[in-house]
Amino acid sequence: MGVDIRRFAPFNGNNQWLKARVGEVLGLHYAVPWPNREFQSARPFRRSPVHHLVEAAGASFGSKMGWERPNFFAPAGCEPVIEYSWGKQNWLTWVDEEQRAARQQVALFDETSFGKLVIKGPDACALLQWLCTADVDVELGRVVYTGVLNARGTYEADVTITRIKHDEYLWVTGSGSVNRDRDWISRHIAADQSVTVADMSSAFAVLGVMGPNSRALLQSLTSADLGDEAFPFATSKEIDLGYFTVRATRITYVGELGWELYIPSEFAVGVFDLLSSRGEAFGIRNAGYYAINALRLEKGYRAFGVELTPDYTPVEAGLLFATKLKTDIPFLGRDAVEQIKAAGPKRLLVSFVLDDPSMMMWGGELLLRNGAAGGNGQVTSAAWGTTLGRCVGLAYVWDRTGGVVTPDFINEATWQVNVGGTLVAATLSLRSPYDPGSERIRA
């Protein structure tokens, strides 16, 4: 993926932009490679309609596919800057409060940078049934979490798909994947199929309203019934929100009750203001992508580009539940997945929690099994989890003898993580450390 030209967009071909960015890249070649370093050149670049509002609220921005995205929010009187270090950085206590808001009250996330593709045509369903691991031939308004594989059975995308109409779907992907995904879909449209793919990423803002108070907040603004029976998990509907009409999708990437609101860009400022003002009574707090990353790791949610790449399969990633293997419906990569499943995986993705709360992790660290040198795994993602009170993450583990990795291989061993040269005990699990039964998201 590191040499895939599809990681760039046409706007990256601007020579003035390239001159500024390439100069910074070369200048950083011998600089300290801080784990969360952000580029400073040719910014700000792409901005959501509510950029000025989150900036005024104290946001510190990162950049993804050119989008300015709030990483965290500094409290009044503090500069929203990162003080780089390998340990716990200056923003950690601020993100603690953002995580608490999402777990205990309600958090507001600007997620406008999501990639949004509209796939339409009489053959849209047939095309997506072939490309997607999960069954997308569902009722209107249903949201499906699915992988997208190649013929080797490894990941090309990890997305949610909403059936908008009989012949129309909304494909939602990560900020950095939209060009890659559009290319993948387009190249698999057969000559006799009638399907169009349109990138609508800039046409809609996305605001995530997440936390146990999210339903009460939104219900106070809409005539739609947001109760669990009328609006169950993985449902998407157009609803009124004050004077505005938005698409509300009940889904989560932070492990809490919540909705993603897809808002025509011209209405985004009005909706943001409405949520912010009404939300004060419900404990609303602005939150950023550092909080999202920590919350998703406590819940064990995977991310494309780290846990899910063209190197890994659903068998290894623990995502067979998001496939059609229990049916006879074919999909791209199915034969390879069935073969790997039958043979047994040589590596498995696990959640882990460090035992020592004083340690900070950033990802990439090695895991040791029963103290053996050489490593039996590597961390893909890690963050400080406020709810758990320590670092949490995901890692692939393997048997250095080349054997099949089973639950017993994981559960009947002691594990350590090499954190900057210090071996720290860790607890591994094939289930998420937080709310493993997913009761909170279905409240």
Image: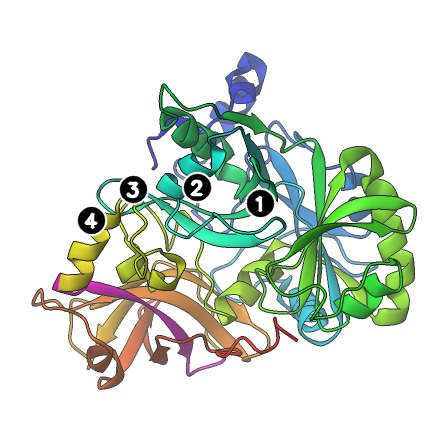
Does residue 137 appear to the left or right of 91 in the view shown? left
Which residues are the magenta region?
Answer: 343-357
Q: Are marks 4 and 1 in contact (CB under 8 Å)?
A: no
Task: Please determine whether, in this image, residue 127 is positioned above or below residue 145.
Answer: above
Name the residue tied to disc 1: 163
Q: Amino acid at mark 4?
A: Asp
| Mark 1, secondary structure of its residue | strand
Q: Residue furthest top?
A: 15
Q: Position of residue 158 (x, y in %)?
A: 44, 48
User: Circle 2 is placed at which residue position?
Assistant: 31
User: Looking at the image, is mark 2 or mark 1 nearer the viewer?
Assistant: 1
Q: Earlier in the sequence, mark 2 or mark 3?
A: 2
Question: Which residue type carries mark 3?
Answer: Leu
Is residue 272 depicted above or below 216 in this figure? above
Using a 10 Å C-alpha cutoff, classify the residue at mark 3 as few (fewer than 14 neighbours), some (14 to 19) or many (20 or more): some
Q: Which residue is mark 3?
A: 332
Q: Nearer the viewer, residue 133 or 305?
A: 133
Q: Looking at the figure, which quarter contains the N terminus?
A: top left
- Which numbered disc flags the more N-terminal residue, 4 or 1? 1
The secondary element bearing badge 2 is classed as: loop
Asked if residue 347 is among those painted magenta in the image, a careful observer would answer yes
Residue type at mark 2: give it.
Answer: Ala
| Residue position for label 4 | 335
Residue 199: x and y in percent read: 58, 28
Extreme residue toward the left, this view = 401
Task: Give the Cα separation between the discs numbered 4 and 2.
Answer: 46 Å
Q: Amino acid at mark 1?
A: Arg
